[in-house]
């Protein structure tokens, strides 16, 4: 697997991003999807990485800089053909290392609740993320939850 910065120009990346957004909308109540679309991922404060196996895209994930000391994990998605092959773990470890290299003290993420979110939640918790308070502009609801990792 090859993890590289993604310039968001490939059809494969666009397809995986579309799959990610469709999944978020189908598993979340209206008004509770905070996943970034293509234009949001192109923001100057966001770095996107994709994982490749030859010409196949295996996964995508992003790091959004919130301030000088903290970042947010965004748009984590493994391609269905690569589930349970370590793609998400490798990408998450890469993002954590990048956040540490940037001097961040904390990584955070917002996600949903329910069966569709359990595999991702288990991954984040295995890597030391713990539940905590809302951050940035997020508002707490019965559906969403917030996880944080001290770096």
Image: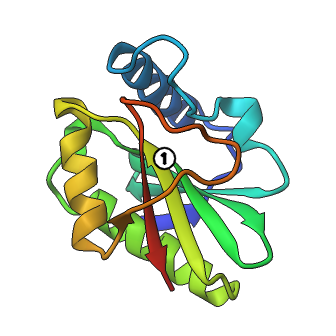
- Residue at 50% x, 34% y is 12
Q: Quadrant of residue 25?
A: top left
Residue 94 in the image: state x and y as whole percent: 46, 74
Badge 1 crowding class, 10 Å Cα cut-off, few under 14, some 14 to 19, many 20 or more, is many
Total numbered labels? 1
Which of 37/130 is in front?
130
- Residue at 50% x, 38% y is 140
- Residue at 29% x, 74% y is 127
Residue 81 in the image: state x and y as whole percent: 22, 38
Q: Quadrant of the N terminus?
A: bottom left
- Residue at 74% x, 36% y is 40
**Residue 1 visible in the shown view:** no
Residue lying at the far right of the rendered structure:
44
Residue 90 in the image: state x and y as whole percent: 34, 69
Residue 18 placement, left or right of 143: right
**Residue 107 visible in the shown view:** yes
The colour scheme is: rainbow
Residue 8 placement, left or right of 45: left
Vertically, is 26 above or below 7?
A: above
Q: Secondary structure at mark 1?
A: strand
Which of 81/110 is in front?
110
Residue 114 in the image: state x and y as whole percent: 22, 31
Vertically, is 123 above or below 110?
A: below
The residue that disc 1 covers is 110
Q: Quadrant of residue 102?
A: bottom right
Residue 104 placement, left or right of 92: right
Vertically, is 71 above or below 20?
A: below
Which of 89/82 is in front?
89
């Amino acid at each position: 697997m090859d993890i590289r910065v993604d310039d968001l120009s490939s059809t494969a990346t666009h397809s995986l991003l579309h799959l990610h957004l469709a999944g978020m909308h189908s598993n979340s109540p209206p008004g509770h999807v905070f996943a970034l679309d293509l234009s949001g991922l192109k923001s100057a404060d966001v770095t996107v990485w994709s994982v490749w196996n030859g010409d196949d895209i295996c996964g995508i994930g992003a790091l959004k800089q919130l301030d000088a000391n903290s970042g947010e994990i965004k748009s984590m998605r493994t391609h269905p053909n690569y589930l349970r092959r370590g793609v998400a773990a490798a990408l998450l470890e890469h993002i954590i290392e990048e956040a540490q290299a940037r001097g961040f003290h904390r990584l955070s993420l917002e996600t949903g609740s329910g069966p569709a979110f359990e595999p991702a939640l288990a991954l984040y918790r295995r890597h030391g993320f713990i539940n905590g308070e809302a951050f940035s502009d997020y508002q707490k609801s019965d559906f969403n939850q917030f996880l944080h990792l001290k770096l």
